[in-house]
Image: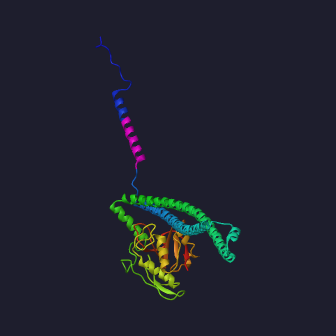
């Protein structure tokens, strides 16, 4: 009886089932493809990597200058704190000396019994001797009063010094905390830039470096006639006079003597030339490595001029000049945040410490967004 039972028919025929299955598989594959492409991490081009690395380096330089500023403040706070601590120690020594003097006076008074002067006069057999002793006692009393005053004065001074020291210590800790924050920011930006560069193939890295060299004019070589990049002209002349220095070959070619406005400017340029080829290290002020503001500060220090530490304070250290008025020795600043500085040497060029991996070099000032210039001295 079961043999005669008819099997149930599917509402779709066999071909229809196969078609539906095929469409389902195709739909699933398409969905997978789109999902995969939607979550894929496309490989950036060399140009994109360069743009991102440039951005990271700029942000790292901003953080570097903030680090330099925090370090300058921390150093000043530490110096002030140490000065107050030393002064408190000297005051404490004077206080102890004054206390010892008071103790000696008290002991002497105890030995005499501290008798009333009228009683001493009544008991003495020699009034003249008494009067002499009384005069000495009066002088001793004056010395004792002065000693007490000195003790009180030292105690008040020590209390004030301790209060000031506590304030300086609080400020020092705040600056040190800011120092750590900015250091972490610099390290993070530079690490991110290195990670991006490490993703490039050898061919892509070569293209990247070629583009960087083209942007820097003469590339890693700082002088066309001096591949080592360590020599340069020196200036002479009296202060306030003129001194002749030589400009490096510009990106457009050509070379001509440039007259510095004074001997100090020539000396600053001469010092900067002697640093060509030395590495960029953030936070460094020489003599073996520099960051951008560390180099300009050291160059002008060699000329006898003290500059502040950071780019955003150096720009206010002299007289502002326009780009058309630039003269050798001027400080030239870049980016809207005044985060980079170089030393102008004439001919549209500067000596600067560019960034990690790029040593101190000569470069055209138009390779970065110009923000202003300052003439020192």
Residue 84 seen by the camera: no
Name the one closer to the observer, 251 or 284.
284
Relative side of 207 to 121, left or right: left
Residue 307 seen by the camera: yes
Give the quarter of the image for residue 156. bottom right
Q: Which residues are magenta?
A: 23-40
Is-magenta flag for residue 203? no
The way the protein has been coloured in the rendering is rainbow
Residue 78: percent from left, percent from top: 52, 66
Residue 101: percent from left, percent from top: 58, 69
Quadrant location of the N terminus in the rendered image: top left
Is-magenta flag for residue 24? yes
Residue 46: percent from left, percent from top: 40, 60
The residue that appears at 42% across and 62% down in the rendered structure is 50
The residue that appears at 51% across and 79% down in the rendered structure is 329
Give the quarter of the image for residue 224. bottom left
Q: Main secondary structure of the magenta part?
A: helix
In the picture as drawn, the residue positioned furthest to the top comes out as 1
Relative side of 152 to 265, left or right: right
């Amino acid at each position: 009886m079961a043999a005669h039972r008819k099997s149930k028919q599917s509402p779709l025929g066999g071909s229809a089932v196969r078609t539906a299955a095929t469409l389902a598989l195709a739909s699933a594959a398409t969905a997978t493809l789109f999902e995969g492409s939607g979550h894929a991490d496309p490989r950036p081009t060399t140009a994109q990597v360069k743009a991102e690395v440039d951005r990271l380096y700029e942000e790292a330089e901003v953080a570097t200058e903030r680090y330099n500023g925090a370090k300058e403040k921390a150093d000043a706070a530490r110096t002030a704190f140490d000065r107050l601590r030393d002064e408190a120690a000297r005051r404490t020594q004077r206080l102890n000396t004054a206390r010892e003097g008071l103790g000696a006076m008290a002991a002497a008074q105890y030995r005499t019994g501290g008798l009333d002067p009228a009683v001493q006069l009544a008991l003495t057999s020699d009034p003249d001797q008494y009067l002499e002793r009384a005069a000495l006692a009066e002088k001793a009393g004056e010395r004792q009063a002065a000693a007490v005053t000195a003790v009180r004065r030292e105690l008040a001074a020590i209390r004030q010094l301790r209060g000031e020291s506590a304030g300086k210590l609080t400020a020092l800790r705040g600056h040190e905390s800011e120092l750590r924050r900015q250091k972490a920011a610099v390290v993070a930006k530079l690490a991110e830039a290195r990670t991006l560069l490490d993703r490039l193939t050898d061919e892509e890295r070569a293209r990247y470096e070629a583009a960087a060299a083209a942007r820097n004019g003469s590339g890693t070589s700082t002088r066309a006639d001096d591949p080592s990049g360590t020599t340069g002209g020196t200036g002479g002349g009296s202060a306030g006079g003129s001194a002749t220095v030589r400009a490096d070959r510009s990106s457009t070619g050509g070379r001509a003597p440039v007259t510095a406005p004074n001997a100090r400017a020539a000396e600053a340029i001469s010092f900067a030339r002697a640093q060509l080829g030395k590495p960029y290290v953030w936070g460094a002020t020489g003599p073996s490595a520099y960051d951008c503001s560390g180099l300009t500060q050291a160059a002008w220090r060699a000329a006898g001029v003290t500059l502040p530490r950071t780019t955003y304070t150096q720009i206010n250290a002299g007289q502002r000049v326009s780009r058309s008025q630039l003269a050798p020795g001027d400080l030239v600043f870049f980016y809207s945040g005044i985060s980079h500085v170089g030393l102008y040497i004439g001919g549209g060029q500067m000596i600067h410490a560019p960034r990690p991996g790029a040593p101190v070099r000569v470069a055209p000032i138009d390779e970065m967004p110009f923000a202003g210039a300052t003439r020192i001295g």
